[in-house]
C-alpha cells in the first residue's frame, strides 16, 4: 500500500463507509421484499407498469417516445429504455442500478454538506440518509425517485464546488438540474427562484457562472419542448400533465392528496387520466383541443374554483401544509405502511420525517442569518420545492426529492445542537431543543381523518387481483375479503369475489357476493349491473330487471346496461320492450358488430325485415369477419325469393361457421329452389357433417342417397 493511497484512504474513508452502508441497507431490504409478488409483477403498480411499458416501446425503436406530446416527464422512461436496450428488461438489475444511484446520492450529499455546512454535519447527514427508510422503500420500485434524487443531490454538490471553483462544475450542476426537471417539471419553480439569487451574487459569481448554470437547464427543457412541437404539433413545456394535476390539487373534490378523475383503480392511470381529462375538457369547450389547450382548461377550472371559494381554498392549503410537514407518508400506487406485512424493516414505525424535518428547519434557521451563496441556494430549493408540491397535491414520493437537502441541514442542526450541549451553552441548547420538540410534535400530530392503515384495502385488492390473474381464486378471494373489511366502499373487491366464485363454478356464492356489493355501493351503477348479469345467468330474468333499472337510474347513458335489459326482455318474450332498450343501447354504446347483429335479429323477430337487413349489413361493415349477420341477410333474401342475392351471404357464413348446420340447411334449401340437386345434396352432406339431424322428407323429395 503506497503512501499516496494511504493518504487518499485516510481522507476518504468516511464516504467509503457511507457507500458500503448504502449498498448493504438497500441490498438487505431488497432481499426482504424479493418474495413479494409485485417485485417482478408490475401490472397493479400503475406508474411502474406505465414506465416499464413506455420504456420497452422506446427500446424497441420508438426513440421519439410516441407520436404525441409527453403527458408526463420522459427522463425515467428513457433511462429504463437505455438499460433495456443494453441488457433487456431485467427488473432486478434495474433495482440494483437504483442502489448504485442511491450510493451516488449518499456521496453527493456528503460532499455537498461537507463543503456547505461542515465535516460533522456531513457525517451526520450521511448516516441519516443511509438509514432513511422512505428512500430505501422507494428505491425498490420501478419508479423515478432514485434517479431524480441522485440528479438533485449531484446538482448541489457541483454547485457547491463551482461557486468558488471551476465554471465547469456550475455547468455540471445546471445540467443535472435540467435532467431532473425532465422528470419533475415542478423543479422549474426553483429554477425561477434561483435567478434573483444568482443576480444578487453576480459580482462574485460572474456572468459565466450564471450562464453556465441556467443554459443547460434551458437547453434540455428546450429540446423536449421542441420535440413536443415537432412530434406532437403542439407547444408544451416538457409535459402536459400540469393542468390536470393542478386541478386534482385545487378543486371542490380536492383533499390534499391524489384522487382519480374517473373510476381508475388499476392499469395505466397516466393514459387513462390523459384521455379522460381530454374528453372532459373538450366537452366543456365544445370542440377538439390540443394538449396545451386541455392543460389550460384544467388550470382555468382550478383557478375559477379557487377564486370563487377563498374560504375552502384556505382550509385546503392548511390541510396540504399539514400533509407536507407531517410524518405520515402519503401513499400513491404503493403503501409505505402496508409493507410491514412484507418486510421486517417496516415492523417498527420509526417517525423518520418527524426526526429529519425539525432538525432540518433548525439547521436552516441557524444558517440563514450568515449564510453563503450555496447555503442560500439550498434553503431556497427546500422552500421552492415544498411550495411546488403544495401547489398540486401531496404524496410521499413527490416530497422525497427535497429530503436529501433537508437532511443536509438536519446534519448541521444536530451538529450545532450537540455542540451547544457539549459546551454547556444551556440557553441556546434549551432553545434549540424546544424548537425541535415543537416542530417534531407538529410533524407527528395526527391528521384529521387519516389512518395509517387507511389504504390497506386498496393494497389487499391489488394482491387479490394478482392471485386472480394467476388463477389462484381461493387466495384471491381471501385478499378481496380483507379489502372489503377495511374499505367497504371498494365495490370492485365484491365484484372480483363474485367473478372468482363464478370461475370456481360456484354461481350461487357468486350471486351473494354481487348482492353484497350492491349493499356496499348502493349508488354504483356498475355494481348493480353486474348483480343483474349474475341473476340473468341463473335464469332469474325477471328478478334482474330492478337492478338494471337502478343501474340506469344512476347512469342513464350506460350502454351495456341497456343492452343487457334488452336481452332480458327478449328472454322473457317481451320484444317491444326489448326494442326500446336496444335503441337506447345503440344511442349510448360505441359501434359494435355484436350490438348491430342482435338488434337486427330482434327486428327480424318483430317482422321488420327491411330494418333487420339494414342493421345486419351495418354489422358486416363494422366487422367483416363477425359471424351471424350474413346468415340473417341470406334468410331475409331467401324468404323474399332473391336466391341469387342470398347465396353469397350463405357462402360467407359457411366459411365463418363451418360447424353451424343451419347455414348448410339454408344453402341446401336454396339449391333445391334453384333446381341444382347436386349442389343441394353436397350442402346437405355438409349439414349432416356439422351435426344436423337427418331430414327424411328432404331425402325422399330430392332422392338423396349417401
Image (cartoon, helix red, strand yellow):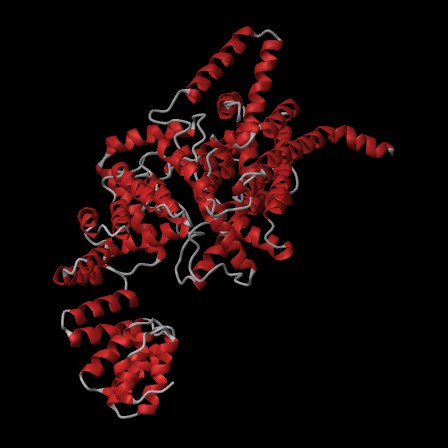
User: Please, which residue is most extreme toward the left here?
Assistant: 576
Q: Is residue 529 above or below residue 190?
A: below
Q: Is residue 552 visible?
A: no
Q: Is residue 126 visible?
A: yes
Quadrant position of residue 567? bottom left
How many tags in the picture? Answer: 0
Q: Residue at x 64, y 41 (%)?
A: 100
User: Please, which residue is most extreme toward the bottom here?
Assistant: 675
Say which quadrant the C terminus sits in.
bottom left
Q: Is residue 493 left or right of residue 112?
A: left
Q: Residue 462 at x, y = what percent?
A: 44, 41
Q: Residue 657 at x, y = what percent?
A: 36, 74
Q: Is residue 624 above or below residue 394?
A: below
Say which quadrant the N terminus sits in.
top right
Q: Is residue 157 above or below residue 666?
A: above
Q: Is residue 126 left or right of residue 702?
A: right
Of residues 482 and 385, the one drawn nearer to the viewer in this rendering:
482
Of residues 617 and 360, the one drawn nearer to the viewer in this rendering:
617
Q: Is residue 422 left or right of residue 594?
A: right
Q: Residue 427 at x, y = what percent?
A: 52, 7
User: Please, which residue is most extreme toward the right here?
Assistant: 2
Q: Is residue 257 above or below residue 570?
A: above
Of residues 604 and 526, the one drawn nearer to the viewer in this rendering:
604
Quadrant position of residue 343? top right
Of residues 77 and 358, the one drawn nearer to the viewer in this rendering:
77
Q: Residue 661 at x, y = what percent?
A: 33, 75
Amino acid at each position: 500500500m503506497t503512501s499516496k493511497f494511504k493518504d487518499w484512504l485516510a481522507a476518504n474513508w468516511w464516504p467509503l463507509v457511507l457507500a458500503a452502508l448504502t449498498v448493504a441497507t438497500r441490498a438487505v431490504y431488497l432481499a426482504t421484499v424479493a418474495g413479494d409478488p409485485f417485485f417482478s409483477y408490475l401490472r397493479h403498480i400503475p406508474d411502474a407498469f406505465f414506465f416499464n411499458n413506455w420504456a420497452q416501446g422506446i427500446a424497441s425503436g420508438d426513440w421519439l417516445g410516441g407520436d404525441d406530446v409527453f403527458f408526463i416527464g420522459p427522463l425515467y422512461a428513457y433511462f429504463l429504455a437505455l438499460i433495456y436496450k443494453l441488457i433487456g428488461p431485467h427488473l432486478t438489475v434495474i433495482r440494483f442500478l437504483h442502489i448504485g444511484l442511491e450510493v451516488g446520492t449518499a456521496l453527493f450529499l456528503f460532499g455537498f454538506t461537507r463543503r456547505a455546512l461542515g465535516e460533522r454535519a456531513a457525517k451526520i447527514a450521511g448516516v441519516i440518509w443511509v438509514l432513511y427508510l422512505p428512500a430505501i422503500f422507494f428505491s425498490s420500485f420501478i419508479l423515478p425517485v432514485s434517479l431524480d434524487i441522485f440528479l438533485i443531490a449531484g446538482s448541489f454538490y457541483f454547485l457547491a464546488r463551482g461557486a468558488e471553483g471551476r465554471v465547469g462544475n456550475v455547468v455540471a450542476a445546471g445540467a443535472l438540474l435540467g435532467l431532473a426537471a425532465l422528470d419533475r417539471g415542478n423543479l422549474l419553480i426553483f429554477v425561477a427562484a434561483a435567478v434573483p439569487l444568482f443576480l444578487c451574487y453576480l459580482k462574485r459569481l460572474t456572468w459565466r457562472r450564471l450562464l453556465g448554470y441556467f443554459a443547460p437547464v434551458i437547453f434540455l427543457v428546450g429540446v423536449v419542448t421542441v420535440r413536443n412541437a415537432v412530434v406532437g404539433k403542439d407547444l408544451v413545456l416538457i409535459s402536459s400533465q400540469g393542468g390536470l394535476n393542478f386541478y386534482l390539487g385545487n378543486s371542490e373534490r380536492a383533499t390534499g392528496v391524489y384522487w382519480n378523475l374517473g373510476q381508475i383503480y388499476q392499469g395505466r392511470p397516466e393514459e387513462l387520466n390523459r384521455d379522460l381529462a381530454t374528453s372532459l375538457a373538450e366537452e366543456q369547450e365544445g370542440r377538439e383541443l390540443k394538449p396545451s389547450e386541455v392543460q389550460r382548461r384544467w388550470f382555468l377550472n382550478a383557478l375559477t374554483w379557487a377564486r370563487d371559494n377563498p374560504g375552502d381554498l384556505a382550509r385546503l392549503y392548511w390541510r396540504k401544509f399539514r400533509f407536507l410537514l407531517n410524518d405520515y407518508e402519503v401513499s400513491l400506487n404503493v403503501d409505505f405502511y402496508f409493507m410491514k406485512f412484507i418486510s421486517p424493516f417496516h415492523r417498527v414505525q420509526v417517525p423518520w420525517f418527524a426526526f429529519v424535518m425539525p432538525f432540518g428547519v433548525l439547521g436552516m434557521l441557524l444558517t440563514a442569518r450568515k449564510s453563503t451563496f450555496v447555503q442560500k441556494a439550498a434553503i431556497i430549493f427546500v422552500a421552492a420545492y415544498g411550495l411546488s408540491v403544495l401547489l398540486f397535491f401531496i404524496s410521499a414520493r413527490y416530497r422525497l426529492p427535497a429530503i436529501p437537502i433537508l437532511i443536509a441541514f438536519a446534519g448541521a442542526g444536530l451538529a450545532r445542537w450537540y455542540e451547544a450541549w457539549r459546551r454547556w451553552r444551556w440557553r441556546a441548547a434549551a432553545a434549540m431543543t424546544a424548537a425541535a420538540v415543537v416542530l417534531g410534535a407538529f410533524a407527528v400530530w395526527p391528521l384529521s381523518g387519516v389512518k395509517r392503515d387507511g389504504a390497506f384495502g386498496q393494497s389487499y385488492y391489488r394482491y387479490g387481483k394478482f392471485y386472480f390473474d394467476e388463477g389462484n381464486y381461493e387466495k384471491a378471494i381471501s385478499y378481496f375479503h380483507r379489502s372489503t373489511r377495511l374499505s367497504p366502499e371498494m365495490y370492485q373487491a365484491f365484484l372480483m369475489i363474485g367473478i372468482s366464485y363464478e370461475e370456481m363454478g360456484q354461481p350461487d356464492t357468486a350471486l351473494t357476493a354481487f348482492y353484497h356489493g350492491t349493499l356496499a355501493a348502493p349508488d354504483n351503477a356498475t355494481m348493480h349491473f353486474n348483480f343483474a348479469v349474475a341473476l340473468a345467468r341463473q335464469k332469474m330474468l325477471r328478478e334482474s330487471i330492478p337492478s338494471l333499472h337502478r343501474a340506469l337510474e344512476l347512469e342513464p347513458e350506460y350502454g351495456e346496461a341497456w343492452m343487457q335489459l334488452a336481452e332480458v326482455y327478449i328472454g322473457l318474450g317481451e320484444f317491444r320492450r326489448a326494442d326500446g332498450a336496444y335503441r337506447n343501447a345503440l344511442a349510448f354504446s360505441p359501434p359494435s358488430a355484436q350490438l348491430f347483429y342482435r338488434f337486427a335479429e330482434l327486428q327480424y323477430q318483430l317482422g321488420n325485415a327491411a330494418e333487420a337487413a339494414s342493421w345486419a349489413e351495418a354489422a358486416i361493415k363494422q366487422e367483416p369477419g363477425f359471424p351471424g349477420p350474413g346468415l340473417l341477410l341470406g334468410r331475409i333474401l331467401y324468404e323474399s325469393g332473391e336466391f341469387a342475392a342470398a347465396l353469397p351471404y350463405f357462402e360467407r357464413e359457411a366459411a365463418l361457421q363451418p360447424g353451424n348446420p343451419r347455414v348448410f340447411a339454408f344453402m341446401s334449401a336454396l339449391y333445391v329452389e334453384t333446381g341444382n340437386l347436386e349442389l343441394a345434396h353436397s350442402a346437405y352432406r355438409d349439414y349432416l357433417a356439422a351435426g344436423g339431424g337427418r331430414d327424411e322428407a328432404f331425402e325422399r323429395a330430392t332422392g338423396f342417397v349417401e
